[in-house]
Image (tube, helix red, strand yellow):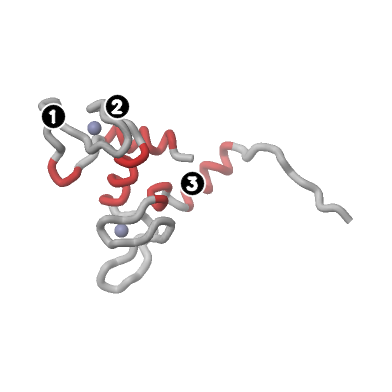
Amino acid sequence: MTARRYTAPMPDELRHRLRAGQHPARAVPCPHCQAHAHRPCQLRKSGRPLPQPHQQRIAAWAQLTACCPDCQVTPTVPCRTPQGWPLPDHAVHARRYQEAEDTAP
Ligand SMILES: [Zn+2]
Ligand SMILES: [Zn+2]
């Protein structure tokens, strides 16, 4: 008996649902709660897993994976002001999040 193989590409709708189940920012470690890559963020007091990654993790992920359409930096380079200064608190421009989501595998 041979197993049948299904090689049809995954429908977009399904892919979107999968992505909704696990945020792509989980691909990077969390600088806030120290969660390892591919592990969920945790509440630092109780260790309880969080359904969504920390904001700091999403920022780190966006910085690592996407160019910023706003300040024109390349992946891994922090966002900066038009004067060339880093944004306060390691902030990331809003459009860079969108860019990261669009290019997420
Ligand atoms: Zn975290
Ligand atoms: Zn930027």
Q: Nearer the viewer, residue 21 or 47?
A: 47
Snapshot quadrant of residue 76: top left
Is the residue under label 2 in contact with that under label 3 (CB below 8 Å)?
no
Q: Tag 1, which secondary structure? A: loop
Q: Position of residue 28 (x, y in %)?
A: 37, 51
> Which of the labelled discs sits on residue 84, or is there none?
1
Q: Residues within 10 Å of mark 2 (few under 14, many from 20)?
A: some
Q: Quadrant of the N terminus?
A: bottom right
Give the answer, above or below, for where 35 lies relative to 56.
Answer: below
Label 3: which residue? Answer: 19
Give the answer, above or below, for where 26 lies relative to 80.
Answer: below
Which amino acid type is marked by label 2? Pro
- Pointer 2 residue Cβ closer than 8 Å to ligand 2: yes
Name the residue rendered at 44%, 39% in the picture. Answer: 104
Disc 3 versus disc 1: distance between alpha carbons? 34 Å
* Of labels 3 and 2, the one closer to you: 2
Q: Position of residue 63 (x, y in %)?
A: 30, 40
